[in-house]
Image (cartoon, rainbow, N blue to C red):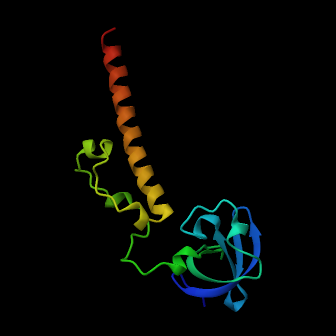
Amino acid sequence: MLEIGAIVEGKITGLTAFGAFVSLPDGKSGMVHISEVSNTFVKDIKEFLKEGQEVKVKVVSISDEGKISLSIKKATEAPAEEKPRSFNRQNRSSDRPRANVWQGQQKQQPKEAMSFEEMMAQFKAVSDEKMSDLKRSTESRQGSGRRGR
């Protein structure tokens, strides 16, 4: 039975503009998104993969519907220290100075050590914080203008 984190051999059964479908053991199949093919930018997946090619893949996730997400690049990476699996708002420190976010001084993992999902979660957190600050600032300016009338 396949489980998240397992590294297995598979055969590419189809290529699309967004990824590759891979036949896995036990008659299952999964998909490698184009962003999970290589550590370098992949514009044309056909430059990296061919139908019928045997590949080593890592099971990244299995949805409730049974869709299996795979990664070729994670299957070939050297083992690294444990990375956080997902962003959790409760992990954020509410007492950190806001100036650090604006000045980009918060402690961050090197981008090479972060998955795309982790980078997007970090970007979204900073963006949400900036938008919240901007909204508060705008509301306070509008509120002070109303009082003067």
In front: 39, or 82? 39
Quadrant of res 17: bottom right
Number of numbered discs visible in the structure rendering: 0
Residue 56, percent from left and from top: 61, 84
Quadrant in the picture for the C terminus: top left
Residue 96, percent from left and from top: 23, 50
Position of residue 118 relative to residue 135, above or below, is: below
Q: In this view, does 39 lie to the left or right of 13?
A: left
Q: Which residue is drawn at 41% across and 55% down?
A: 122
Position of residue 56 relative to residue 90, above or below, is: below
Q: Residue at x 70, y 71 (%)?
A: 20
Residue furthest to the front = 47
Position of residue 64 relative to residue 100, above or below, is: below
Residue 50, percent from left and from top: 74, 76
Quadrant in the picture for the N terminus: bottom right
Q: Which residue is drawn at 70% across and 68% down?
A: 47
In front: 78, or 69? 78
Q: Residue at x 77, y 74 (%)?
A: 14
Residue 43, percent from left and from top: 66, 59
Quadrant of res 61: bottom right
Residue furthest to the top = 149
Quadrant of res 49: bottom right
